[in-house]
Structures are given as structure tokens and as C-alpha cells.
């Protein structure tokens, strides 16, 4: 599901809301999650999962085309851990 499909589904299920308002709500939620993660905070949605930021150390990598060694800088990467309710639902429990 992409963002526009999510917005359309929410708008269809809530006919009392204008689509532009639903779009603003969805965008605000995503922006708040992004802002929190960029500040290094953890975002937890009970039953769904938790978003956090993990640090990857600098390392020596390999260019797959040429085979030569390259230095890969340290970086921050997003990480998502599923909640128990979502995990159980995906596994049919």
C-alpha cells in the first residue's frame, strides 16, 4: 500500500472527512515520526511496532564491480521492530 492508497482508504471509510483533511492528517503523522527519528527518539505504536534509529559503524567495503576496497562511512539507519499483535496476526495466531 502506498501513501495515496492509505489516504483514499481512510477517506472512503470516513465520509464525514474531506480528502484534503485526511491527507493532511496522514502527512502530519508521517512528519512527526520522521522528526522524532531524526532527533534520535524512538516512536512506538502499541500493537503495531516501534521505529528507532541504529548506528552503523564505519567499515571497509568492497566495490562489487571492480573488487577494490572502499571505505564506507558511519551512518544512521532506520529500524522497525514489529509489535506482538502485528507479529501474531501475520503468523495467523
Image (cartoon, rainbow, N blue to C red):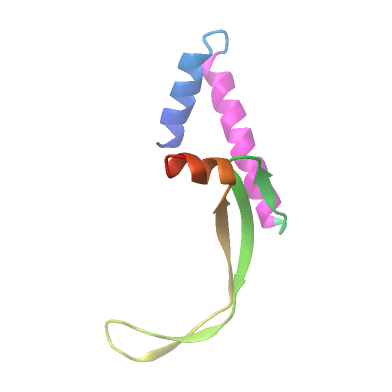
51, 37: nearer the viewer: 51
Locate residue 56: give its quadrant.
bottom right
Residue 6 % position (x, y) = 46, 29
Q: Does the magenta stretch mainly form a helix, a strand or a loop?
A: helix
Residues shaded magenta: 18-38
- Residue at image location 59% in from the left, 79% down from the top: 57
- Whether residue 22 is in magenta: the answer is yes
Residue 7 % position (x, y) = 48, 26
44, 8: nearer the viewer: 44
Residue 66 % position (x, y) = 28, 87
- Residue at image location 56% in from the left, 22% down from the top: 22
- Residue most toward the top? 16
| 43 w.r.t. 11: above or below | below
- Residue at image location 64% in from the left, 57% down from the top: 52
Left or right: 32 in relation to 27: right
Q: How many marks?
A: 0
Left or right: 49 in relation to 69: right
- Residue most toward the front? 93
Amino acid at each position: 500500500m502506498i501513501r495515496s492508497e492509505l489516504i483514499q482508504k481512510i477517506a472512503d471509510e470516513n465520509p464525514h472527512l474531506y480528502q484534503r483533511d485526511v491527507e493532511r492528517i496522514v502527512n502530519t503523522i508521517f512528519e512527526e515520526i520522521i522528526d522524532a527519528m531524526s532527533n534520535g527518539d524512538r516512536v512506538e505504536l502499541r500493537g503495531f511496532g516501534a521505529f528507532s534509529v541504529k548506528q552503523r559503524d564505519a567499515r571497509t567495503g568492497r566495490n562489487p564491480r571492480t573488487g577494490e576496497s572502499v571505505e564506507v562511512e558511519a551512518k544512521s539507519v532506520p529500524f522497525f521492530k514489529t509489535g506482538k499483535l502485528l507479529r501474531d496476526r501475520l503468523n495467523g495466531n
